Amino acid sequence: MFFWVSFSLCEDMPDVEGENQTTITEFILLGFGDLHELKIPIFVVFLAVYIVTLTGNILIIVTVSYNHNLHNPMYFFLGNLSVLEVCYTTSIAPKMLKTILVVQEEVSFSACLLQFYIFGSLAVAECFLLAAMSYDRYLAICKPLHYASTMSFQLCFQLAVGSWVIGFLSLVITMPMVSRLPFCASKEIDHFFCDLTPIIKLSCGDTYMVRIPAFIIASLVSFSPFLLTLLSYYKIISTILKIPSATGKQKAFSTCSSHLIVVSVFYGTLMVVYAAPIVNQWPNLNKVFSMLYTVVTPLINPIVYSLRNTEVKETLRKLFSKNSF
């Protein structure tokens, strides 16, 4: 993901030869320590967001499973995206909520690496899943006559499984190298979760051999699906503009507008956090934008697809009416 791309490949590392080194076995997440007086309101707000996020995405999963009319490629990918968002936000939110209440949250080195691995793998998987969804919309709008034969269940399954597999394999090279880094100075991570950038900054050894492979892997697993998504929407928009009637254009655009909103928010916040140098220079600003893609983005998915999709809204209405009765 972009969290690797932002590393400075020419960053100078401290010379620690000859220094007495004490191996660090745990880190301290500082979280939002500078907002300690507001910890209760902040905790309540983010707890509510987390609950709504879980509820919304679980409702999407239930809705897609409940309505047989939604058993098609677009909603199959949407169900996968909702499962991913539940796992994604759960890998961050509980620990974040604890750091709000506790000024300095201690986390073991292994637990910190595990959180980074899960979070990073799910972020990469989401990139590829969003690319698969954009390809589905490309076929539906640009090649409607071949859509049913091309986007078969087998292809949908392969694209979904491939996204998950690539996500969890993308860090198998980086993780062992990070785990062997020496940590002997400060153990305070000025963040609310274990991201790779703040972890590497704490190392007192030479991180060059970690940053180079991480940069290469990041380029492959983030920009590849991003470029595929851009290419799909370039084709989609070009096709929509060729439709003569305004009603036809609106109908065609409505089939991909929800996905386009999710893609824009997801990649937009990632680029701001990991590609904008000024954000990395201001830890508090980095935390604010990090909250957008770790907390807010998983919340947007069910809201956008529920409010902008008639079939989903109708299924939810029937589901609640049936349960109420």
Image: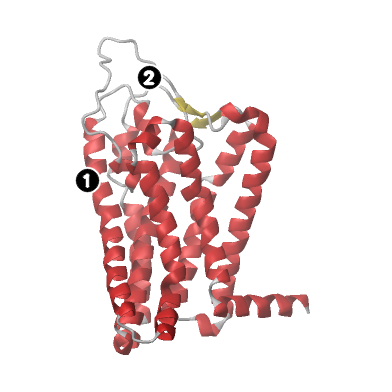
Residue 176, above or below 201 = below
| Picture coordinates of residue 144, whole percent (x, y) | 33, 86
Residue 198, above or below 55 = above
Residue 102, above or below 53 = above
The image's mark for residue 81 is: none
The image's mark for residue 184 is: 2
Q: Is residue 323 left or right of residue 186?
A: right
Q: Is residue 57 left or right of residue 156?
A: right
For the point 34% across and 68% down, the residue is 132
Q: Quadrant of residue 21?
A: top left
Q: Quadrant of residue 272?
A: top left
**In this rendering, which labeled residue sits more in front, label 2 or label 1?**
1
Q: Amino acid at mark 1?
A: Ile
- Disc 2 crowd, CA 10 A, few/some/many (<14, 14-19, 20+): some
Q: Are dots 2 and 1 in contact, CB under 8 Å?
A: no
The mark nearer the N terminus, 2 or 1, is 2
Question: Which structural element holds mark 1?
Answer: helix
